[in-house]
Image (cartoon, rainbow, N blue to C red):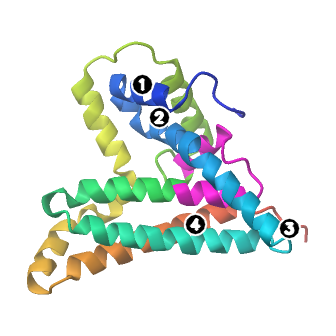
Amino acid sequence: MSGRTPGLDLAGIRSRLRQHPGFAPELLALAAVEGIGPRAREWAHGLREAYPDAGPDGLARLATRRFVRVAGIGGATSALAGLFAPVAELATVLWSQASLVLHLAAAYGRDPQDAERAVELLVLTQVHPDADSARAALEAAWAADGPGDRPWPRAAEAAWRLAAPLAAQAGGWAALRLASRLVPGAAVLAAAAGDAAAAERLAARAVAAYRPVRAS
C-alpha cells in the first residue's frame, strides 16, 4: 500500500471513527498522516533549505530532541489531571508519538503523507506486530461501511488497543498516586520521565527502520 488514501480526509476519518470505534488505532494513524504529515514535510524541507549541509541523521536528532521534550512536558501536564490522568496521558502520548515518527520519516526522505506511514506508525508504536497485520487492519478500516455492530464492545476493544503504548506503565499508576501523596510532585516527575523515555525508545526503533543500510 502506498500513495494517498483516496476519499479519506480528516472529516471522513472522524465519521468512520464514530461508526467503527473498534478501528480507532488504524483510523487515528490515518488521521495523523493526514493531519501531521504536511507539517512534517514542511519542517524537513525548511531545514534542508536553511542548512543544506545537514544530513538525515542530524535532522533525526533534532526531531528526537523536540518530541522527547514534548512527550515529557505532555506527561507532566497530563499527570495533573487527577482521576483522568491515564486518559489524558494516553491522548498526549499517541499524538506526540505520531508526530515523532512522521518527522523522523521526513528526515530520512520518506513522504510523511504517504499512506504507508500509517502502516509503519502502527508497527513502530507496537499496536500491530508486523506490517502485514497493520496493512490488513487498515484495509478493513477503509472497507467498513455504515454503523458497526455492537458499538460498546468495539469501543472497549478500541480503548484497550489504543492503550498499548502505555501498557508497560499501566501498573504504575497506583504507585504514582501513592507517591504523589507522600512526595509533592512525584507523580508529575515520574510521568514526565516515563513518557520521555518511551519517546526515546520509539525514536530508536524509527531511526533503525528509516535509516538506509550502509554498504560495508
Query: Outermost residue toward the left?
Result: 181
Q: Which residue has dot 2 on it?
A: 27
Query: For the N terminus, which image quadrant?
Result: top right
At label 4, the amino acid type is Ala
Q: Residue at x 34, y 50 (%)?
A: 163
Q: Residue at x 54, y 56 (%)?
A: 99
At label 3, the amino acid type is Arg
Q: Which residue has dot 3 on it?
A: 214
At label 1, the amino acid type is Arg
- Give the residues in magenta: 99-123
What separation in Å lies between label 4 and label 2 (alpha carbons)? 22 Å
Q: Which residue has dot 1 on it?
A: 16
Res 107 seen here: no
Q: What element does badge 3 sit on?
A: loop
Identify the image quadrant of residue 3.
top right
At label 2, the amino acid type is Leu
What is the number of the mark on residue 203?
A: 4
Q: What element does badge 4 sit on?
A: helix
What separation in Å lies between label 1 and label 2 (alpha carbons)? 8 Å
C-beta proximity under 8 Å, tags 1 and 2: yes
Q: Nearer the viewer, residue 172 or 52?
A: 52
Tell me: residue 69, above or below residue 124: below
